[in-house]
Image: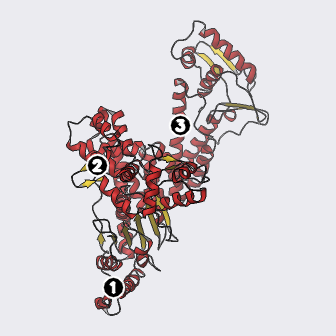
Amino acid sequence: MSRPPARTASPGAMRFSLLGPLTARIDGREVPLGPRKQRLVLATLLARPNTPVPVDVLTDVVWPDDPPRTARKNLQVYVSAARALLGATGSDGRERVVHGCGGYLLRVAEGELDTLRFGALARAGREAAERGDLPGAARLLRQALDLWEGPPLNDLRDSAGVAEEAGRLEARCLTVFEDWAEAEIELGRAGVAVDGLRDLVERHPLRERLRAAWMNSLHQSGRQAEALAVYDDYRQLMARELGLEPSPAMTALYRAMLGRGREARRSAAPERPGPVALPAGPGAFAGFRDELRDLLAVLDGGEGRVVVVSGPAGAGKSALAVRAARLLADRFPDGRVLVRVRREDGTARDRADVLAEAVRLCGAAGTAADGPDAVRADGPAAAADALADVWQAWSARRRALIVLDDVPDEASVRGLLPRSGACSVLVTARGQLPGLAPVHRIALPALADGEALELLGKLIGAGRLRTDPAAALRIVRACGGLPLAVEVSGMRLAVLRHLPLAEYADRLDDPAGALDELVAGDVSVRHRIASGWQDLADGDRRVLARLAALVDDGGFTLDRAAAALGCGERAAIRAVESLIDAGAVTSPAGEVTAHAALYEVPRLLGLFARDREGA
């Protein structure tokens, strides 16, 4: 039978902590531990409690490169100072610090040191799990985790020796967290572990047991699409980083979840599955993990949801929407279809045309009272109204996901938003469509450097990326983190294999020629930006051109905007906010006053605007 964890020391006893910054307290009062080298010695002794630590080990921790000739004497001074601070004897009456042939030994009772208490609770928790006492196991493991106050020894990690000890402590914590999460999942309480698992997976993306627990917690919480997305991200990461596939156990878990999803779908809707009309996903996709997770959570979390994904032309909105729709197959058994709301030339399609395509793709015409003939009416407006009635009748009785892609304005889609029922709609738009409410909004930011490099590497190969990482970074930054521009750069470089990355980076750094370089076959960044430019009102175009000329990098304050526009503060605020609504200017993600905010014009849009102003 397992020994229960020792009782904590009585008031007045010494307590040491390594699970966070190194601290020592007496009667709850923190004891100053002296200069840094003395704290390094104490941290090393506490990391190996009740065990002799060789003098050579302590020397390497304190002086990793070039120890002085007086190193041993200095260590004796630090240990003597520690004795004076901590007391000559421990709680058991024995000498606190002793020196022998094996080195220095620091005596610590279980209730005096948080790592010893952590280990005792963890062992007791695992033994409870082995006896089948899952509630007791979960409780004890949670108590162990609650002892952690942050990264172990985070104030001394610039010492390689201490960092190594801290790494071992972190590994122990991860294992205990996995034990606790698995116990909670088995108890049917997966919801309490989801957020913690997500955070740890982001910090340790290749740790498979964490991934598996996160998948299980999401699946048990009813978030099937997100659970499958976790596996998909892991599979891509393993292939990219290690050239490996996930383990057979992980793959089996994924297939089991797919099977359970199909079984649930068959039991809920025995009739044949609804239509699927989605374009092929992009050949390369990177970034937007948080946005995808948010999108899946919203669409998977309820019925009749409307989500607007906004961002400038080329921001990756359509790719993100298609990826989400594919992952949500089990959530929307009555169909997942995408309808483009613009023509190829970028102009808006007629509302009746969009409704007719939605009705056709979903097979909704048969829901009208008089069959397909009910959609026939005299005049375009009457035809659109009739189609809207057919569409609303169909969507009210279905659970389908409709992607309305590249929406120019609110009026283009109002008739397609379900008034009732379980259908959800995912709208992509360059502007933010502020007139639509209530909706959930996701604004796509520019790709971070790492995400953009990941996308570029998928197109030109990781090996070529490593030949000149500095030039690769210049390329993605010259693209302003715009996914389309990074993708076009990759497509060009994949063909022009002789072209050094540094030379192509030089071309993109040149403001006069950057947009001319971003063309691959019939895919042109300039053409896509021009389409967005045409969406702007004449007044907004003039304002954007003046703002883009403020600074080369596109950043400006409200005061500078007012000066450049030659207007007062209120007029400048209205002009800038109009461009924010249109997706042509970005603003800070958090709340900040208009005067303190730094607004930005995306680099490539700024180049285009300045070019048009000078034409």
Q: Residues under labels 2 and 1: Cα distance?
A: 40 Å
At a point 37% along the width and 38% down the height, the residue shown is 473
Secondary structure beneath label 2? helix
Q: Where is residue 114? Give x, y as percent.
A: 65, 36
Q: What residue did someone put label 3 on?
A: 170
Reply above or below: 357 against 225: below
Amino acid at the residue labelled 1: Pro
Q: Is residue 601 left or right of residue 18?
A: left
Q: What residue did someone put label 2 on?
A: 488
Residue sitting nearer the eye, 254 or 236: 236
Query: Label 1 near label 3: C-beta < 8 Å?
Result: no
The residue furthest top is 69
* Structural crowding at the residue carrying mark 2, measured as other residues with C-alpha within 10 Å and reported as few (<14), some (14–19) or many (≥20): many
Secondary structure beneath label 3? helix
Instruction: Specify whether residue 320 is in view.
Output: yes
Amino acid at the residue labelled 2: Val
Q: Is residue 81 left or right of residue 159?
A: right
Q: What residue did someone put label 1 on?
A: 380
Which badge, 3 or 2, is on the more N-terminal residue? 3
Q: Where is residue 510? Give x, y as percent.
A: 34, 40
Amino acid at the residue labelled 3: Glu
Instruction: Specify whether residue 190 is in view.
Output: no
Residue sitting nearer the eye, 115 or 140: 115
Q: Residues under labels 3 and 2: Cα distance?
A: 42 Å
